[in-house]
Amino acid sequence: MKFKNIVIVLLILALAIPATSFARERNFKNEGELTIWNNEFGGSLNLGNAGYNLKSNFKGDGDFGKKTVPGFGWTHNIGKLSDVYVHYNKIENSGRLRAVGTGTVSFNGTNYTVVGGVATINMDLKMDIFDILGAREIARGENGYLDFVYGFKIMKCSFEAVDAANVNNRASYNVTLPLPNFGVRGVYHLSKDWNAYGQFSGFSLNRSNKGGTLKYLDFGVEYKIKKQTSQNVDWSVMLGYKDEYVKGNDDNNSIVIEHKGPQFKIVGRF
């Protein structure tokens, strides 16, 4: 997460730099958002539990292309200092993956054809991602504010692995991960119609060779394109960058999944 320092600096500026008086968007009860995320897929598989014998890198050993995925979010203010946020998006990655193992290459009890020490696998990954977050304002300056965020990122993951040399050799693996998510988010008022925003959050817990790590980064700029239409809606557009990193460990099985890239948002407040 090499961009986290940008967010830290942004949040410090939001509280430390004098500016004109900043009014938080608390006169709106609800906020809906449509997100468009162009992301690249990376990570790795290092599997050594019973029924598994496979090592590979999604980016270095695969041909997974970039994906553009929509998402939908909703924020509901529950007071002057607090709100609740939910978001959903679905990501599907498909590609051909080169994998190695110790003698054989196995995935969930299925052995794959090995040629020259390498198995070629057609891999499909599907992820349904739900965010449920609460937020509480912990500091405010003349030009911005800082929130503490807390909640869960729920990931429903499905792997489908088919032998490229023999389609009868196939296996699947499904898992749902409820990952705690804690961090900070902030807004910095740049000018009348421009804001900068950022969020850095995550969680890590490892015990007895089992556990997981979540790192989440979302930052960018917001431009208010129209205020208070006849339907009493404030419209804004946002352009930024999002990075989502997940690592899971289960004894000798380790999986890393990362999606990152630019993100565009359309936001309506009412």
Image (cartoon, helix red, strand yellow):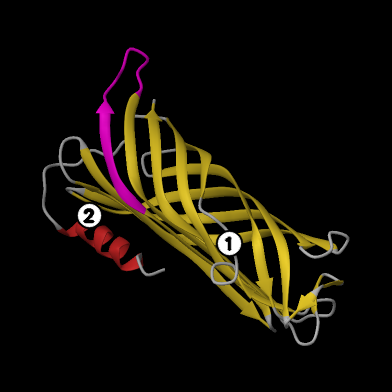
Q: Residue at x 26, y 24 (%)?
A: 227
Q: Which amino acid type is marked by label 1?
A: Asp
Crowding near the residue tagged with mark 1, few <14, some 14–19, many ≥20 C-alpha atoms within 10 Å = some
- Vertical comparison of 41 with 141: above or below: below
* Nearer-N-terminus badge (1/2): 2
Q: Is residue 77 visible?
A: no
The region drawn magenta spans 219-233
Residue at the extreme bottom: 102
Q: Which residue is mark 1?
A: 63
Q: Position of residue 256 (x, y in %)?
A: 59, 70
Q: Which amino acid type is marked by label 2?
A: Ala
Q: Position of residue 192 (x, y in %)?
A: 16, 36
Figure quadrant of the N terminus: bottom left
- Per the model, the C-alpha gap separating discs 1 and 2 is 41 Å
Front one among 122 and 244: 122
Q: Is residue 216 toward the left or the right of residue 119 in the image?
A: left
Q: Is residue 105 toward the left or the right of residue 138 in the image?
A: right
Choose top left, top right, bottom left or bottom right for residue 177: bottom right
Q: Is residue 244 visible?
A: yes
Q: Which mark is residue 14?
A: 2
Q: Residue at x 39, y 33 (%)?
A: 267
Total numbered badges shown on the rendered structure = 2
- Vertical comparison of 86 with 257: above or below: above
Q: Is residue 108 magenta?
A: no
Residue at the extreme top: 230
